[in-house]
Each structure stands twice: as C-alpha cells, then as structure tokens.
Amino acid sequence: MKNGKSSEEHRRQAEEEKGSIDFAIVTVSDTRTPETDRSGQAIREMAEAAGHQVVASRIVPDEPEDVAAALDDFSGSGAQVIIFNGGTGVSKRDRTYDVLSRAIEKELPGFGEIFRMLSYDEVGAAAMLSRATAGTYRGCAVISLPGSTNAVRLAMEKLILPEIQHLAWEITR
C-alpha cells in the first residue's frame, strides 16, 4: 500500500482525474471484415456503454509487421488503451502475442493469469491455450485478447472495464 492509500482509494482518484478513457481497437484476423468483426464491435459497444470513447480502430491480417504497425500508430494516436483481439492462440498464424510481448515495456502478468482462470470456468482446460496478455507501451495500456466474442465480453466485463481508469491513471502518474 503506497502512501497509505488502498487500491479502492486509487480507483476513486483515478475516476476523478481520468474520467472517460480513449480506446483504440485492433482486430487481428485474416478473415474478419468491418461487417463480421463481432469481437471488435463488442469491445466498442461495451467501452462506449461504460462512458468511454473509441478513437481509432483497425482490422489487420495476422502478420507481425501489420500488428506492430497498428501498435505504433495507435500508441501515438491519443488512445490511452489499445485492445487487440485475435492471434493469441498457438496455431502457426497466431502471432499477436509474439509481436506484443517483444514490444511491451512493463508486463502485467496478472491480467493473463486471471483471464485464463476466469476462462477455465467457461471453456475448461482449453483456457491454457490462450496467450492473452497486457502491459504498457509508450504511455498506453496494451491488452491482447482472444478473437472469441465470448472471451472479449468476459475480459471487458470482469477485468478491463472495472479497472481501466485506475490502470490508465497509474501509467501516467
């Protein structure tokens, strides 16, 4: 407990100081289009319903250079949080984690651990196949989720939205 403040006190202070958070969304997929990107749409809808803004979004193929370009572009776009969805599994085409893990400056291992724990309740042992991760990059929170709409909803509801103002505040203070 730093300076005698609890995480609840930090959350309240973050809400007061940060208010609405600016999100960027990157869907990593070789097949999704704006019309079929249900996971990206779910992130947008849930963020906006919670009072936040989506300032940028993009669909990129699961190619390392495209994932890296989206990270670099959106980290300079004014977004405080960049959420990637897709490319976190273990198939040959799943490379989002590989790109982001090399770029992340400060990893938040608890995010992936808790996400997999929560996922276990829904999908069983298959939860261990997810390489969901989070961390910081150039003053932004970077979160990488599976492409499954159910996984996105779970992460947004249970992890991201309850803590996003606090996370954004901690990164910039």
Image (cartoon, rainbow, N blue to C red):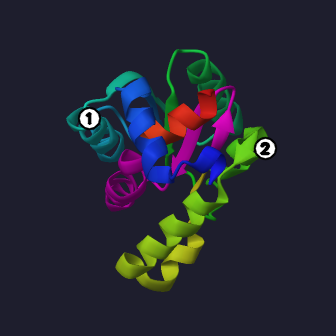
Residue 126 seen from this side: yes
Secondary element type, mark 1: loop
Farthest residue, direction front = 4
Please give the name of the residue rendered at 57% of the width and 76% of the height, measured from the top-left corner: 128
Badge 2 marks a residue whose secondary structure is helix
Position of 107 with respect to 55 (left or right) is right
Q: Which residues are magenta?
A: 135-163
Task: Name the N-terminal-most of marks 1 and 2.
Answer: 1
147 in relation to 102, above or below: below
In percent of width and height, residue 61 lies at: 55, 37
* Quadrant (top left, top right, bottom left, bottom right) of the N terminus: bottom right
Nearest to viewer (mark 1 / mark 2): 2
Q: Which residue is mark 2?
A: 102
Q: Amino acid at mark 2?
A: Arg
Magenta span contains residue 110: no
Tell me the residue at 56%/58% (across/down): 111
Q: Is residue 150 magenta?
A: yes
Towards the viewer: 54 or 170: 170
Q: Is residue 53 left or right of residue 58?
A: left
Q: Nearer the viewer, residue 12 or 145?
A: 12
Label at residue 35 = 1
State the image coordinates of residue 3 (x, y, percent, origin top left): 63, 44
Identified by mark 1, the residue type is Glu
